[in-house]
Image (tube, rainbow, N blue to C red):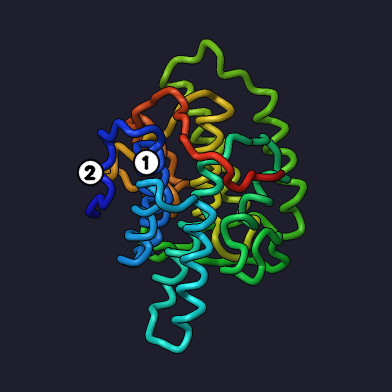
Amino acid sequence: MIDEFSEYYEATEPGRRERAHAWATAIWLQDVDRLKPSSYLIETAKRNIEGEITQEQARQIVDAYYESKDSHDVPPDTKEADKVAARMIGVINSPTFTFSPTYYLGLHQRIFEGVLSNAGEMRTVELMKREWVLNGDSVQYGPSFLIEKSLKDAFAEERRFRYKGLSEDAFVMHFASFISAVWQIHPFREGNGRATRIWLDLMLRRELGQSLQLRYTPELQFQGDNSILKGAQVLEILRNVEYAEPENTGESGGEETGG
């Protein structure tokens, strides 16, 4: 995948570098689903990176563009990738994070509002989805009637765990196990992968003080989603992640993430 924002990564202007990384993350987090942004989204993102428009204005511009393009031949996947990326920016740049199932559900609503009709709603049906990474086999997702309880239990158990003093291997092993459990609950009918990936990035940066630098390692493209239950692949991805201090986005006045 070509990195459209690499020219900004060494920028010295306040906030420009951070905004470029945020847009790159929003795009890369969808790439595993083979969702590609349009050139219009890229150009709109660059306007935000360069300080011409705010992140909220960027979202409004993208939404307005697709409202006017409804009668034209716009690939549905491209439209979805653009609108979700424009919403992810507000989440990535938000200073708020709450470690709770409520926040996780709210995160799905935030990034898919106006994109999916059931944004933020827990599924009430059973799922079976054949995964290409599993050679056509299906993942056994959690039953719908246990979603709320399963999420509550998983978060409560993780809250009791202490990462302090762990070796890198022990950290990766436990964190991969927790994320795998959350993903396999699969609380939503659609969008589980992207909601889990962006939540993973937020938890590492805000809760654990480490940053998942997919922005600097596009070759990873976070392949762990569709195969996240395959622990060996998740561990390999996390072990190749570079860690850094949380970044100052340089963006003010944007939307705030709620629980």
Q: Is residue 101 visible?
A: yes
Q: Is residue 102 above or below residue 123?
A: above
Residue 122's spot in the image, x, y percent? 70, 60
Q: Is residue 114 above or below residue 152?
A: below
Q: Please identify the quadrant where the N terminus is shown.
A: bottom left
Residue drawn at (50%, 15%) of the image: 166
Give the amino acid type for the residue marked by disc 2 in the picture.
Glu
Residue 254's spot in the image, x, y percent? 57, 46
How would you rate the neighbour count of disc 1 (Cα within 10 Å): few for under 14, some for 14-19, many for 20 or more?
Answer: many
* Picture disc at residue 159: none
Residue drawn at (40%, 87%) of the image: 72
Which is nearer the eye, 183 or 35? 35
Looking at marks 2 and 1 on the same chain, the residue that comes earlier in the sequence is marked by 2
Residue 20's spot in the image, x, y percent? 35, 44
Residue drawn at (43%, 23%) of the image: 245
Q: Are marks 2 and 1 in contact (CB under 8 Å)?
A: no
Dot 1 corresponds to which residue?
21
Give the amino acid type for the residue marked by disc 1 in the picture.
His
Q: Which type of secondary structure does the marked residue at label 2 adopt?
A: helix
Q: Is residue 237 visible?
A: no
Q: Please identify the quadrant where the C terminus is shown.
A: top right
Dot 2 corresponds to which residue?
7
